[in-house]
């Protein structure tokens, strides 16, 4: 009897210890599953539900028909800021985001993400697609609450057909068209965790350029007459529009695959399904007569569809007209899931559940702020004050054609004061900003990538394109040329380093050196890899971004790094040929 009690006590102690472990994931959580789908550069008008007869989106539209549609929902004008807001529930300048590349897209480390909270609450979490809020741990999605990540952490990608991607930091090759591949990973995740609570974040990379889509979708549009056209003074490029709409129909196809999987497993009644886009359309096309597109703080640049479905739990087919924003997503999801976390910082967003569940709830008037490129506009329930302090009644003037500021000066001036107060509170003084180096060698993660987009070229070295996100370094021709990365080694250690490169057979033999402080390693390039540029064979419209190549890894050796900040440099000691190599990225693996 005594031994039985001792054994029972030991078992209880072990179980309690497991419960306290940060890796413990209780299976007893009863909250609903959550799927958050984010399109990239899809406009409010790029859906049949919005009244666009140019395309068919029955599966996305069904989320609105089977749930709640927010008619006036707002995001920020470009990618990273919107993603930061939906992940944190706070306006993006508060979280350190100020750009879409070269480190400015990273969310500050003292911010809490929706995935952090849900993971702590017992959810299995995954993000598949375009992250765009930091690449190196602890900015990487695996360090921001996501158990599983597949896709790319950069702002755009150079090819959508079986490209180089990453799986939890490890470089891998994609499988087919990227949006389909991302969805495949989502379907597998649902299958694996169908009996446990899960949070699936699917940030699609389309219809962002390059304009690539499988033949089955392009063939519907390449000769199609589009009855609804952009009505503004700017010129619409009809071929670009056709490509964008074909890509949206592909998203719709994949949304249909997801909802079919939920029905197959009987999960619709226990899954909250959310759909939105990250900014306005990436070109002038039909968008309900609104002024502005991606990059603009006008109505058309920041208004997006926002649909929420939870079968048999929330009303279906109802439209909410009150304004709402990406900052509201986090508090709304937590409320729907019944989670009340203790947060380190106050939220800017509001819990939208009264608007979802109630007809005519008591809902206070509010303002939503849009900000980018030094321009700020303000949306109230009725008006928009644009970046030039002109006042428009959006109910009667979605195209922002008639300035009412002189007619209603009190309204205009009150919004001006509100904007000044918001900017003073939220947007940091640029003179006080400090540069953040790229972290290297986080002790809890095996891999750290340092891509060309995060480095600087010196001498004759240039980027392959002015847009850094998917670029590579080229024209490395002299021993005075080099590439550098401003890094902060988070914990000392030994790291195996691989260089992803191209080099023609006639240029083989260069000796290169990687160094940081007193540590350095050297290696010779002796295997040719001279692939052609690719991507243009899949483009449906000429691109602005860099084409890509099939870069292969080369082992540089093992480097010993000490903790602290420094300048990591890559240079050539000798160059027997015309040039050294083209460089896509460095991959560090902690030993």
Image (tube, grey):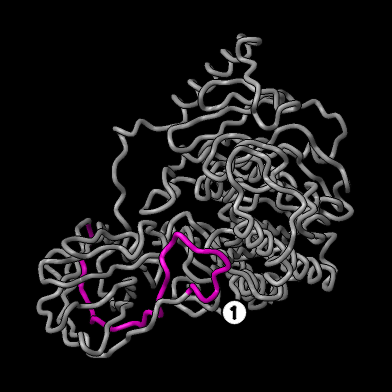
Residue at image position (84%, 69%) is 263
Residue in front for this viewpoint, 565 or 284: 284
Q: Residue at image x 28%, y 89%?
A: 528
Residue 17 in view in this figure? no
Majority secondary structure in the magenta region? loop
Q: Position of residue 262 (x, y in %)?
A: 80, 68
The residue indicated by pointer 1 is 176
List x then y, in percent, for residue 217: 70, 70
**Which quadrant would the N terminus be assigned to in this image?**
bottom right
Q: Which residues are magenta?
A: 535-564
Q: Would you say 464 lies left or right of 291 here?
A: left
Q: Is residue 554 magenta?
A: yes
Q: Is residue 531 left or right of residue 262?
A: left
Q: Is residue 198 left or right of residue 206?
A: right
* Whether residue 590 can be seen here: yes
The quadrant of the image that shows the C terminus is bottom left
């Amino acid at each position: 009897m005594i031994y039985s009690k001792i054994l029972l006590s030991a078992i209880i102690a072990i179980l309690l210890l497991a419960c306290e472990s940060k890796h413990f994931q209780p299976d007893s959580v009863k909250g609903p599953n959550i799927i958050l789908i984010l399109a990239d550069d899809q406009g409010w008008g790029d859906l049949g539900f919005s009244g666009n007869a140019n395309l068919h989106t029955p599966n996305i539209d069904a989320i609105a028909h089977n749930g709640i549609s927010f008619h006036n929902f707002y995001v920020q004008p470009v990618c990273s800021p919107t993603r930061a807001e939906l992940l944190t529930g706070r306006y993006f300048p508060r979280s350190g985001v100020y750009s879409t590349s070269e480190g400015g897209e990273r969310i500050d480390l003292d911010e809490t993400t929706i995935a952090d909270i849900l993971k702590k609450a017992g959810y299995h979490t995954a993000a598949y697609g375009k992250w765009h809020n930091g690449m190196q741990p602890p900015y990487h999605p695996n360090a921001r609450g996501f158990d599983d990540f597949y896709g790319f952490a950069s702002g755009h990608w150079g090819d959508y057909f079986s490209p180089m991607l990453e799986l939890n930091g490890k470089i891998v090759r994609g499988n087919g068209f990227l949006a389909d591949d991302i969805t495949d990973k989502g379907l597998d995740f649902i299958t694996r965790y169908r009996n446990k609570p899960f949070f699936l974040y699917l940030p699609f990379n389309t219809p962002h350029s390059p304009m690539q889509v499988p033949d089955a979708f392009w063939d519907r549009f390449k000769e199609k007459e589009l009855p609804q056209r952009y009505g503004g003074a700017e010129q619409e490029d009809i071929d670009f529009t056709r490509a964008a709409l074909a890509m949206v129909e592909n998203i719709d196809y994949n949304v249909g695959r997801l909802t079919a999987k939920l029905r197959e497993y009987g999960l619709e009644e226990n899954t909250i399904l959310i759909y939105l886009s990250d900014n306005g359309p990436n070109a002038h096309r039909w968008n309900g007569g609104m002024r502005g597109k991606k990059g603009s703080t006008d109505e058309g640049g920041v208004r997006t569809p926002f649909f929420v479905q939870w079968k048999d739990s929330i009303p279906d087919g109802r439209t909410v007209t009150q304004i709402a924003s990406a900052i509201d997503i986090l508090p709304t999801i937590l409320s729907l899931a019944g989670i009340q976390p203790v947060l380190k910082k106050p939220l800017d967003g509001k819990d939208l559940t009264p608007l979802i569940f109630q007809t005519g709830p008591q809902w206070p008037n509010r303002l939503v702020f849009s900000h980018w490129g030094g321009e700020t506009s303000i949306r109230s329930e009725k008006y928009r004050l644009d970046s030039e302090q002109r006042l428009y009644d959006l109910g009667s003037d979605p195209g922002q054609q008639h300035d009412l500021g002189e007619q209603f000066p009190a309204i205009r001036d009150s919004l001006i004061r509100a904007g000044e107060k918001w900017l003073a509170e939220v947007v940091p003084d640029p003179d006080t900003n400090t540069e953040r180096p790229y972290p290297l060698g986080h002790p809890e993660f095996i891999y750290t990538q340092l891509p060309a987009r995060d480095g600087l070229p010196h001498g004759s070295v240039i980027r392959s394109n002015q847009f850094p996100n998917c670029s590579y370094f080229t024209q490395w021709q002299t021993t005075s040329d080099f590439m550098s990365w401003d890094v902060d080694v988070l914990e000392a250690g030994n790291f195996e380093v691989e260089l992803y490169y191209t080099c023609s057979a006639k240029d083989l033999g260069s000796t290169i050196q990687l160094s940081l402080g007193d540590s350095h390693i050297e290696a010779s390039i002796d295997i040719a890899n001279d692939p052609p540029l690719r991507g243009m064979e899949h483009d449906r419209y000429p691109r602005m971004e860099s084409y890509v190549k099939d870069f292969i890894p080369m082992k540089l050796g093992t480097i010993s790094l000490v903790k602290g900040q420094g300048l990591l440099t890559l240079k050539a000691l000798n160059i027997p040929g015309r040039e050294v190599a083209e460089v896509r990225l460095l991959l560090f693996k902690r030993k």
